[in-house]
């Protein structure tokens, strides 16, 4: 499972088109920061720009709990991607976290387990973004299956979490391993 997840992430490097050009991403992030009720940090700005301009199928946001990753970085990504015709899918290991993420992104959230039971087609033509909150809680098996499923569905995967928070109940520290391998 560990080899599968590392291979799936590495195989997706440079394989998808950026959602926005660096110039458009910078403008979008500046607009979002200005419209926010709270000041954005430099890290939030850089993370949002990096996600919007990444050409990797799998990317990550590593951040401490309570740092407003969802309401700043992920909300901006979801808004800008949806405006460009991308389908946004909000995922998390638990129903509670999935519901919270879905509400924050203006979509319906579902658990990773339920998502993995579904059938995903290439019908989105590369215009689908799967945002996975609390990614550190996913087992190596579930992470490998999710990343392989994203590749088959031609979807982009955004893994969000904190390696210092709760780990997976199942075997493996996939989120930490992916970061250690250069994701």
Image: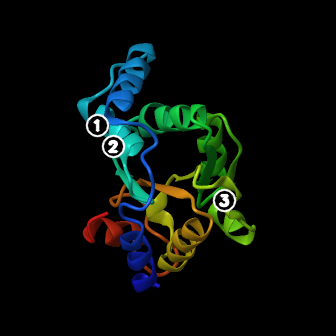
Determine the residue positioned at 40% across, 79% down: 7
| Residue 111 numbered tag | 3
The reply to whether discs 1 and 2 touch (Cβ–Cβ < 8 Å) is yes
Which of the two discs, 3 and 2, labels the residue nearer the N terminus?
Answer: 2
Determine the residue positioned at 48% across, 37% down: 77
Given residues 99 and 54, the one toward you in this image is: 54
Q: State the CA–CA distance, disc 3 to disc 2.
A: 26 Å
Given residues 91 and 20, the one toward you in this image is: 20
Q: Residues within 10 Å of mark 2 (few under 14, many from 20)?
A: many
Given residues 77 and 172, the one toward you in this image is: 77
| Disc 3, SS | strand
Residue that label 2 marks: 50
Residue 80: x, y in percent?
A: 51, 32
Q: Is residue 50 left or right of residue 150?
A: left
Judge depth for marks 3 and 2 and give the one in front: 2
| Residue 99 numbered tag | none
Q: State the CA–CA distance, disc 1 to disc 2.
A: 6 Å
Q: Residues within 10 Å of mark 3 (few under 14, many from 20)?
A: some
Which of the two discs, 3 and 1, labels the residue nearer the N terminus?
Answer: 1
Judge depth for marks 3 and 1 and give the one in front: 1
| Disc 2, SS | helix
Q: State the CA–CA distance, disc 3 to disc 1.
A: 28 Å
Q: In this view, does 168 lie to the left or right of 42?
A: right
Q: In this view, does 183 lie to the left or right of 109?
A: left
Task: Quadrant for residue 161, please give it.
Answer: bottom left
Residue 1: x, y in percent?
A: 47, 85
| Disc 1, SS | helix
Task: Quadrant for residue 164, please give it.
Answer: bottom left
Residue 137: x, y in percent?
A: 49, 65
Residue that label 1 marks: 46
Given residues 95 and 182, the one toward you in this image is: 182
């Amino acid at each position: 499972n560990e080899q599968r997840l590392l291979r799936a992430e590495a195989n997706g490097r440079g394989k998808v088109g950026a959602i926005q050009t660096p110039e458009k991403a910078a403008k979008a992030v500046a607009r979002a920061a200005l419209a926010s009720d709270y000041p954005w940090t430099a890290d939030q700005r850089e993370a949002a720009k990096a996600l919007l301009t990444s050409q990797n199928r799998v990317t990550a946001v590593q951040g401490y709990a309570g740092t407003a990753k969802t309401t700043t970085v992920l909300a901006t990504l979801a808004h800008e991607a949806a405006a460009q015709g991308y389908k946004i899918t909000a995922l998390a290991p638990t129903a509670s976290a999935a519901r919270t993420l879905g509400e924050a992104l203006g979509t319906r959230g579902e658990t990773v387990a339920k998502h993995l039971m579904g059938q995903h087609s290439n019908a989105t033509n590369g215009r689908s973004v799967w945002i996975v909150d609390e990614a550190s809680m996913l087992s190596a098996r579930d992470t490998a299956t999710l990343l392989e499923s994203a590749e088959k569905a031609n979807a982009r995967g955004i893994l969000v979490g904190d390696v210092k928070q709760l780990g997976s109940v199942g075997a493996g520290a996939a989120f930490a391993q992916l970061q250690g391998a250069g994701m």
